[in-house]
Image (cartoon, rainbow, N blue to C red):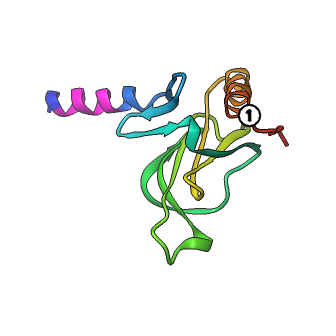
């Protein structure tokens, strides 16, 4: 029973926040079991959105203000296109990344200022003219 409590506590701690590694050539997002690494040269667009679209959760969780996991959009339910979601605060704006022409990632950080700064950095590094909505 003690081992179970320790394991569950460890998993909860790993999912508490998004861990972002922003190198010169890639962006890595991690939260517990979920992680994605995006080469910056494969980014197609970087957009600031108010909310994520309705999606079907394949696996992941929603708790308090957090939404994390792998989802599938309703309009593409016939395909197996997965959308990764790393949202630390569902009430704040999110960054929508599109890479490899049609792969989506939605994320934000607990602090909206850090999210906006990362959005600007990604927009500048990709050379796109993206502005927040």
Residue 122 left/right relative to 59 = right
Q: Residue at x 43, y 34 (%)?
A: 31
**Do we see residue 51 in this rendering?**
yes
Front in this rendered view, residue 46 or 91: 46
Q: Is residue 28 above or below residue 90?
A: above
Q: Element under label 1? A: loop
Tell which residue pokes out farthest to the bottom in this image. 78
Front in this rendered view, residue 38 or 88: 38
Residue 23 left/right relative to 34 = right
**Do we see residue 66 in this rendering?**
no
Q: Residue at x 50, y 39 (%)?
A: 38
Q: How many marks?
A: 1
Q: Is residue 7 magenta-colored?
A: yes
Expressed as whole percent of the image width and height from the top left, the position of residue 74 reads: 59, 70
Residue 49 appears in which quarter of the rendering?
top right
Q: Quadrant of the N terminus?
A: top left
Q: Is residue 85 above or below residue 114?
A: below
Q: Residue at x 69, y 25 (%)?
A: 121
Residue carrying label 1? 127
First to last magenta residue range: 4-11
Expressed as whole percent of the image width and height from the top left, the position of residue 17 reads: 50, 27
Q: Residue at x 65, y 41 (%)?
A: 90
Question: Pointer 1: residues within 10 angstroms few (<14), some, or many (20+)?
Answer: few
Expressed as whole percent of the image width and height from the top left, the position of residue 51 reads: 72, 49
Q: Quadrant of the C terminus?
A: top right
Expressed as whole percent of the image width and height from the top left, the position of residue 52 reads: 67, 52
């Amino acid at each position: 029973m003690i081992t179970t409590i320790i394991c569950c506590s460890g998993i909860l701690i790993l999912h508490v926040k998004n861990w972002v590694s922003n190198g010169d050539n890639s962006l890595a997002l991690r939260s517990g079991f979920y992680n994605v690494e995006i080469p910056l040269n494969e980014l197609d667009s970087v957009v600031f959105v108010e909310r994520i679209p309705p999606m079907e959760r394949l696996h992941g969780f929603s708790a308090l203000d957090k939404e994390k996991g792998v989802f599938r959009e309703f309009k593409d339910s016939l395909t197996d296109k997965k959308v990764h979601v790393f949202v630390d605060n569902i009430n704040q704006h999110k960054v929508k990344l599109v890479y490899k022409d049609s792969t989506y990632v939605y994320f934000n950080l607990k602090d909206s200022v850090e999210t906006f700064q990362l959005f600007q950095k990604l927009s500048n590094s990709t050379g796109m003219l993206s502005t927040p909505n």
